[in-house]
Every structure is written in C-alpha cells, then in structure tokens.
C-alpha cells in the first residue's frame, strides 16, 4: 500500500505537468512570415580531428562541457523560399523543426557550448543569436543578443566520451560517489530547450551552413540520419499541443 501511494504521488505531478503543457500549447507560424538572410561565417569549419583536440583541451581546462540547443518549430511555406530548403515534399499542416546542416552532411540544432559560469538561458540566447541572427558570438558576450523566448528544458543527454553516443539518462555506472563528486565520468551534458517563435522575425545564417525545415515525421526514429538526439525530438514534444496558424 505504501509503495502504491509513493508511485501515485510521483505520477500525479507528472500528469499535472503534462496537462499544463498541453493546455498552454505551442503556436507555430508558417515560414512565409519570416525573413531570411546570410552572413559571413565566424570561422572556418573544423575538421573532426581539430575538434577532438579542442574538446579535450577545453575539458582539461574547464571540466564538464555543457551544451544548450534550441528546438524551433515552423510550418512550411506555400511558396518557395530560397534561404530554407525542404528535404521532402512539404506537409503544409505538419510541424517542421529548423536544423542547420554543416558541410552538406551532419545535422545540428542551433545552439552550442556554454562558457564557464554562464547560465543556460543566457548562453542559449547568445548561441541562437550567433547562429540565426546578425549578432555574432563575440557581440553576444556584451549582452547584445536578440530577445529569444526560451521555454522549458525538454530533454537532457550525457556523454562519457566526446564523439560517443549520448545517453538520455545518467547511466547507473556513473552514479558512483567518485563520479558524482568530480564529474570525471562525464565529458558533456546536452540540454534541449523549446523556443517559442514570435509571429515574425528575421533569420540570418552563416554562409557555411544551410537552414533546413524538416518535418517531425521524417526525423522521428531516424537516428541513422539525424542522430539519437534530433530523432528523439518528436517524443519529447508529445506532451505539448500545437496551435497551427496558417493565415
């Protein structure tokens, strides 16, 4: 009886949170309401080897790496927009997530690494501005960032090694006192936040990247193409209701 009461006490708040998320809803606007442009890339794209060396050096200097990324939802436009590419036939009433494609190969969510001591929301606003607006990453350091509406954290992942497949939970083997005290067993913590887009805004993307609007139905379970984090986004969004605005 006591165990059942404990389980019920745990389930009820979760159900209440999910119900509140459904009632609040997420408004999704068509791409025709947004404006798109391009800007010079802040730096050359790294090779995998160079990136691995940089990550190891940063870990040695600062410890656990925390990355924050935004999930931005839109509807496809009823006409062609050259700045945004659709990898499949448009599903006009189906939510699409905005992804950045690097070197015509890997797909990433807009975002990036937090600086030492930087808060999640402020750091994510800085990275979103550097990837999707005229503000560069350096300018964002002075507080000159766009007013992004960062919502709730919808998911977290952990990496034991850079380049390793992330876990959507903290593995039991990492819960030893040694690991929890020093975080030596973790190399990276990855957090996803839902971004609530306004009715209209301007997106400016670095020239070395492509902005893609990909339907949720295409990325669902498609870890082979999009990786385990992006392919799991539809599951994370299942607790929300969508208010699709087409006019």
Image (spheres, helix red, strand yellow):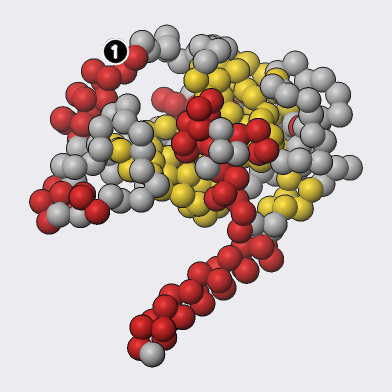
The quadrant of the rendering that contains the C terminus is top right
Q: Residue at x 28, y 29 (%)?
A: 162
The location of residue 4, given as percent across then percent down, is 41, 84
Left or right, residue 90 beside residue 193:
right
Q: Residues within 10 Å of mark 1 (few under 14, many from 20)?
A: few
Percent coordinates x, y for residue 38 in the rendering: 63, 16
Can you give x and y, in whole percent of width and height, for residue 207 in the image?
A: 57, 12
Residue drawn at point x = 46 percent, y = 49 percent: 155
Task: Please tell me which residue lies in front, 89 or 72.
Answer: 89
- The residue to which callout 1 is attached is 49
Residue at x 51% of width, y 47% of height: 193
Nearer the observer, 166 or 13: 166
Residue 160 visible, this orientation: yes
Q: Is residue 28 left or right of residue 173?
A: right
- SS class of the residue under badge 1? helix
Give residue 215's quadrant in the image.
Answer: top right
């Amino acid at each position: 009886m006591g165990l059942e009461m404990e389980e019920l006490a745990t389930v009820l708040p979760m159900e209440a949170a999910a119900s509140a998320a459904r009632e609040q809803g997420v408004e999704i606007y068509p791409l025709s309401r947004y404006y798109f442009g391009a800007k010079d890339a802040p730096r050359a794209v790294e090779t995998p080897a160079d990136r691995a060396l940089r990550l190891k050096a940063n870990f040695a200097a600062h410890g656990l790496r925390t990355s924050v990324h935004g999930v931005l939802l839109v509807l496809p436009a009823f006409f062609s927009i050259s700045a945004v590419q659709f990898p499949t036939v448009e599903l006009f009433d189906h939510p699409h997530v905005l992804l950045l494609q690097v070197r015509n190969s890997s797909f990433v969510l807009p975002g990036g690494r937090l600086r030492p001591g930087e808060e999640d929301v402020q750091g994510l606003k800085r990275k979103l501005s550097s990837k999707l607006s005229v503000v560069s990453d350096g300018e964002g350091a002075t507080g000159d960032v766009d007013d992004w509406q960062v919502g709730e954290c919808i998911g977290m992942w952990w990496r034991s090694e850079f380049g390793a497949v992330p876990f959507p939970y903290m593995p039991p083997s990492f819960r030893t006192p040694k690991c929890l005290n020093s975080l030596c067993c973790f190399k990276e913590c990855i957090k996803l936040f839902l971004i609530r887009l306004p009715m209209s805004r301007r997106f400016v993307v670095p020239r070395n990247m492509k902005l893609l609007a990909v339907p949720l139905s295409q990325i669902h379970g498609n870890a082979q193409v999009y990786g385990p984090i992006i392919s799991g986004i539809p599951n994370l969004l299942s607790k929300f209701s969508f208010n699709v605005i087409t006019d």
